[in-house]
Amino acid sequence: MKKIIIEDFCNARKLALLEEDRLTKLIIEEKFEEGLVGNIYRGRIHKVVRGMEACFVDIGQDQPAYMKIKKGEKLGVGDILLVQVSKSGKGDKRVSLTREVSIQGRYMVYIPSNDRLSYSNKLSKDQVSDLKAKIGKLDIGASTGLIVRTEAQFADLDGLKNDFDSLKEAYARLEEVFRSSLNPGLVKKAKGEIESFIAYNLDKDLEAIIYPEDMDDESDRDKSNHIDKFDIRALVKSLDRAYLEKLVRDKNPATFSNYGVNARLNHYLSNRIRLRNGSYIVIDKTEAMTVIDVNSGRYIGSANYANTVLDVNMGLVDEIAMQILMRDLSGIIIVDFIDMKSERDREDLIAKMKMSLGADGKNTKVHGFTRLGLLEISRRRSQDSFESYYYNQESRDYYSANRLVDMVEERVIGQIYHSLIKNGEDKKTLLIEMEVDKYKRLIANKKDVLKEIEDKYGLDMEFKVV
């Protein structure tokens, strides 16, 4: 069974997925930064670089976005295109675009620009066969591109038809907006990742969706915010009223603390991760790649050295895979396992790593061992990982301004619920002690959020630097 837990703080809205009490997914939507991935734009080609088989497209943002040109595709400066953001920008890398525009429904993903009909790899052969029979009865046309989602296994014929019809109508409206102007700009904003995740996870395994009750506060509906107010009840009601009984409201807004998410999250906010048997891994991120170093630590093992090495390496594969998936590590990933002489042992380890990373589908590829005995993995990135929310590059620790301001709000909530805040003449006052470096980092980046926290909870905060 699985639980979805939502926390809605001033700086960000977060969703955690607990499966069998284990944290398996974390989504963060910052309220002061707008995500672009999935947005659909009217773009104008700004520059064509034939040698790179690419072009730069003006979509109305600060700088043109990058797009690969398919072989044989004839594009020129000034051409107007319908494009979708496929990858967010990071550092010097620009936002990436694709012309293969897709719209997601509950049971299907509609891709009008291709003619492929494919099925989620989480569906069994019998489920695919059953869905093929149902979809064959729909009037979708021979040249319609569709990806049938896992959730479709629970849909009847009418449900599939309604989903497909609504997707076609949505795309027709999208085309109208696209043709209404020649200026670069937003045509359709993507649903938030949290909203999409909830929509795709209303299934028989869902035990509860837990969220703070102040998200239902009617008096807060009209207040402006940096991202739209999120009405969970309305979303669930629009998808399937039967799941309204799964909604659980918590009076305490610090839901991540209340339900143990923060405690579980700490396992992914450290460079050094230890297992109970004494072995451990060290994760080091550089500009070019991520390096994961495997160490036996205090693990004793057997008298046979080769068996001990194999036990340590194989015992850490699942943990390494989970760290890669949870942290959403991307690009080149090098794992320095303890050296194994046996080629069969290496092949067994590669097979286990592929299986452990199998849920990630085509995003991750295990390439094998190099001549130096390093395991090469590559993973495609679509947007920033949750780790970037917590990690501070300058101090090389997991106390970013984002994490610090969340900790401040959590402290405020805790003090309110324990009635430990001093009463001043006009307002309640909370004294917070903080190390000087962290205080400077917080004030330099999150002054506006601190003011929102004071307004939200009706108090003044005073900081004491220690």
Image (cartoon, rainbow, N blue to C red):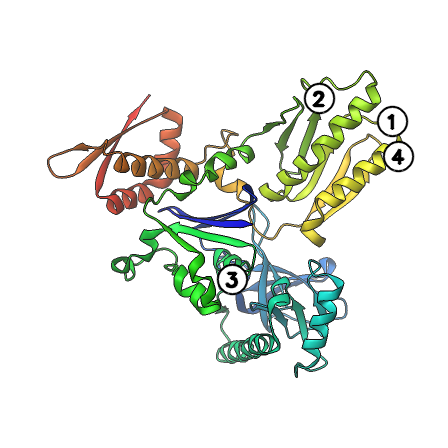
Could you give the CA–CA distance between mark 4 and mark 1, rounded to whole angstroms?
Answer: 9 Å
Q: Secondary structure at mark 3?
A: helix
Q: Name which residue lies at 66% across and 81% down.
A: 140
From the top left corner, tell me how far across and down residue 111 is, in percent. 64, 71
Tag 2 residue: 296
From the top left corner, tell me how far across and down residue 325 is, in percent. 63, 44
- Whichever of callouts 2 and 1 sits on the residue coming sooner in the sequence is 2
- Whichever of callouts 4 and 2 sits on the residue coming sooner in the sequence is 2
Quadrant in the rendering for residue 122: bottom right
Which residue sits furthest right? 343
Q: Is residue 276 above or below residue 105?
A: above
Tag 1 residue: 341
Q: Is residue 232 above or below residue 384?
A: below
**How many marks overall?**
4
Q: Name which residue lies at 36% across and 59% down.
A: 229
- Whichever of callouts 3 and 2 sits on the residue coming sooner in the sequence is 3
Could you give the CA–CA distance between mark 3 and mark 2, rounded to whole angstroms?
Answer: 43 Å
97, 432: nearer the viewer: 432
Could you give the CA–CA distance between mark 2 and mark 1, rounded to whole angstroms?
Answer: 17 Å
Query: Do callouts 3 and 4 mark residues in contact (Cβ within 8 Å)?
Result: no
| Mark 1 burial class by Cα count in 10 Å: few <14, some 14-19, many 20+ | few
Tag 4 residue: 344
- Whichever of callouts 1 and 3 sits on the residue coming sooner in the sequence is 3
| Mark 4 burial class by Cα count in 10 Å: few <14, some 14-19, many 20+ | few
The three-letter code of the residue at mark 4 reads: Arg
Tag 3 residue: 199
Q: Secondary structure at mark 4?
A: helix
Q: Secondary structure at mark 2?
A: loop
The three-letter code of the residue at mark 2 reads: Ser
